[in-house]
Image (cartoon, rainbow, N blue to C red):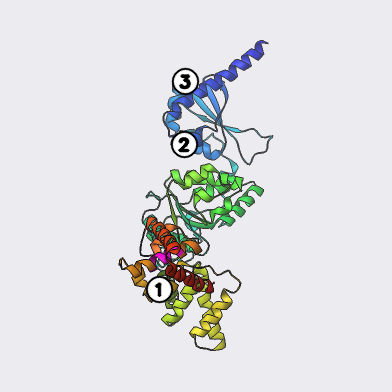
Amino acid sequence: MPKEKESTSKIINETTVWENCLKLIRDNVNPQNFKTWFEPIKAVKLEQNTLTIEVPSQFVYEWLEEHYIGLLRKTIKRELGAEGRLEYSILMETSSQAEKPYTVKLPAKGNSGLKNPSVPMPQQISGGIRNPFIIPGLKKIDIDSQLISNYSFENLVEGDCNRLARSAGFAVAQKPGGTSFNPLLIYGSVGLGKTHLAHAIGIEIKNNFPNKTVLYVPSEKFMHQFVDAVKNNSQNDFVHFYQMMDVLIIDDIQFFTGKEKTQDVFFHIFNHLHQNNKQIILTCDKPPVDLQNMEQRLLSRFKWGLSADLQVPDLETRIAILRKKMYVDGIELSNEITEYIALSITNNIRELEGALVSIIAQSSLNKKPITLELAKQMIDKFVKNTVHEISIDYIQKIVCDYFELPLEVLKSKTRKREVVQARQLAMYFSKQLTKSSLSNIGMHCGGKDHATVLHACRTVNNLIDTDKKFKAQVADLQKRINLSR
């Protein structure tokens, strides 16, 4: 019985001492850091003024030593007196269950335990960190950034659809890790240029800061590497490798959804990079708020920086993209053909460029000149198996043709009655027949706000109910638009 009481007292004592330490620590670090670095720690034993705490990994131990050594000494001295000592019991991810955690002693004064030559170092660290891209050995300068040189800012056409994201990306490239855009999350539908912009930022950073280690990695490759690391019992190497990056670019993070272990390991990599002012750049096919089965702690971190969307490019931007590609490839097409391609493919830059390549290839193989008729034949084949989605640009073109108005007049600020009515009809049909937001519709109609679009829709509905001639015009326009499907 006495022994039992002694054991119970001992457990209470060590727990109490550490809880008192945590109270002081909590007052001296921000809540997020406390949760990340101190909550997982457990008190193990207390013997002769020496408190032993269990930390989950070598990395946590090293982080505590580097960033919180002074605070830990202060708390131990306050609780155990001047002779107080702290020891770490470090759980090794690579150790078997039969092996005991190894211990590192922290003296009350002087340097940290890491510099004590008697401290045993983990085998995977002393043997060199495994590099998933360059194996074996690891030199930061040898890491291939995996960047595609053609995906530069010079080859990225700027428009209203991507101006915010492009500007933020360029700012990051001038001062990686030193802006409020960390992380920078770029989101948008398939084929709108997320990957291009991510590479462009990385290339610009390498040009501005040749000594920085930049790495681009698709999310699927990241997950495959992590699975391999688990199989090879080298998770520590995997984490440490990614924590060495100055700039980490991960493409298509939506594929992390539902992958709990991948999210967990990325959470720790993210924390380390962010807390060390390293730049994180992410791309996704949807805004963070729409990501399902993604841990809340990750979603909250994605919102720390800037989330910038890429929208469907307007007609002028699509034409500019085609002309840019034609210039790079040394090709000349008439304005009529270029505009036809841009009007026919509206929602995907990749498909837009692919259609141009198909037309050029057909002309070259059959040794025929590129005519509007050839372009129409190829476009029909190109979009044959896809549902043709009505675009705002196409609606505006049909409305302008119907009322014999130039497109620039429709988008102007003029308040002439016939122009206002045509503009309102374009807004009305855009809301009815496209998936675009009110603000996006307004932007395409001369920079109007969402309230103006709502007012236009109400006005059109009222006139349909009260004006037979106007109702007939709306029906006629509806037929013309439907014929374009």
In contact (CB < 8 Å): disc 2 and disc 1: no
Callout 1 secondary element: helix
Identity of the amino acid at label 2? Answer: Asn
Query: Which corner quadrant of the image does residue 366 belong to?
Result: bottom right
> Is the magenta region chiefly helix, strand or loop?
helix
Residue at which label 1 appears: 400
The label on residue 33 is: 2
Which residue was labeled with disc 3? Answer: 79
Labelled disc at residue 377? none
Q: Position of residue 209 (x, y in %)?
A: 39, 57
Q: Mark 2 or mark 3, which is nearer the start of the sequence?
A: 2
Against 316, residue 106 (above or below) is: above
Mark 3 vs mark 1, CA separation in Å: 80 Å
Task: Give the mark, 3 or 1, whose residue is nearer the N terminus.
Answer: 3
Which residues, given as a range, are shown in magenta? 422-428
- Residue 434, image x and y in percent? 50, 63
Q: Residues within 10 Å of mark 3 (few under 14, many from 20)?
A: some
Closer to us: mark 2 or mark 1?
Answer: 1
Say which quarter of the image contains residue 171: bottom left
- Is residue 254 rendered to the left or right of residue 468? right
Real-space CA distance between mark 2 and mark 1, rounded to the nearest whole angstrom: 58 Å
Taking the spot 53% from the left edge, 62% from the top edge, the residue there is 190
Residue in the image at 41% along x and 80% along y: 335
- Could you tell me the amino acid type at mark 1? Cys
